[in-house]
Amino acid sequence: MTMRPLAWLRLAVLAAVVALAITAWVSLPYRPLSDLRSLAEWMTPHRHAWYGLPVVVTAYVLLGFLFVPVLLLITATGIAFGPILGPVYAMAGCLTSASAGFGIGRCVGRQRIRHFGGERMLRLSRTIERNGTLAVFLIRKVPAPFVLSNIVVGASRVSFRDFLIGTVLGMTALVIGLAGLGYQLTLAFRNPSWPNIAMAAGFVGLPL
């Protein structure tokens, strides 16, 4: 299917609106619990639309470079797209955002990373290079800024294949757990029963 330039423009505008909405939502110091249900209800007609995945992927890339925590993005994706599409879309968004950071790091190169981060950053880059997939897997378990970690890995000589495999292995449980938590929270706020609360707690424990 070939899209006209106007259709691409509309898609870009929609992605920008979604990105700004998520940024505003995660930045507010206080949010009524009903906002979760409102977000889920607002997104219901759009969950199975063809533009859902492109919008999510674009939002992850844009918000990633704005240093919005990826954990919040994953949870919001679960709230918006439910327990099945939520984890799938969240993983696609994480991989795309991670690949963008990896590409920047590969273009920047190790020497520039050393210039900004010093010898310590250079040693970290060499350690990542020696361990490949395992190093990327372990990095995904560390609460470091998502975009910065991707740039550092990209600046090393780790192959893109090892980078993707390590990211998938390191983030699958986290994505399923947080996206499921987001969806379960909407159910818990709608019907605050013990089974719904217990299920939400179970999703929190899954990444652990």
Image (tube, rainbow, N blue to C red):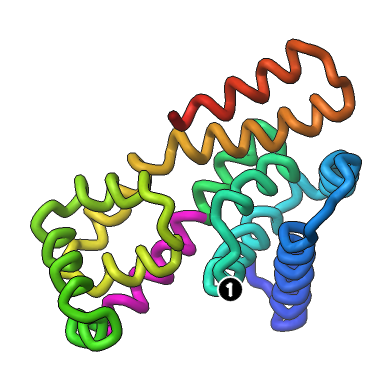
Q: Residue at x 23, y 88 (%)?
A: 115
Q: Residue furthest left?
A: 130
Q: Residue at x 56, y 58 (%)?
A: 69
**Residue 191 image offset from top left, x and y in percent:** 88, 21
**Residue 207 image offset from top left, x and y in percent:** 46, 32
Task: Judge whether residue 107 is colored magenta.
Answer: yes
Which element type, helix, strand or loop, lies under badge 1?
A: loop
Left/right of residue 126 with respect to residue 43 in the rendered view: left
Read off the magenta span. 94-108
Closer-to-camera residue (52/26): 26
Vertical placement of residue 83 versus 93, above or below = above
Vertical placement of residue 70 versus 3, above or below = above
The residue that label 1 is drawn on is: 66
**Residue 127 image offset from top left, x and y in percent:** 13, 60
Query: Where is residue 197, by image quadrant?
Result: top right
Q: Amino acid at mark 1?
A: Leu
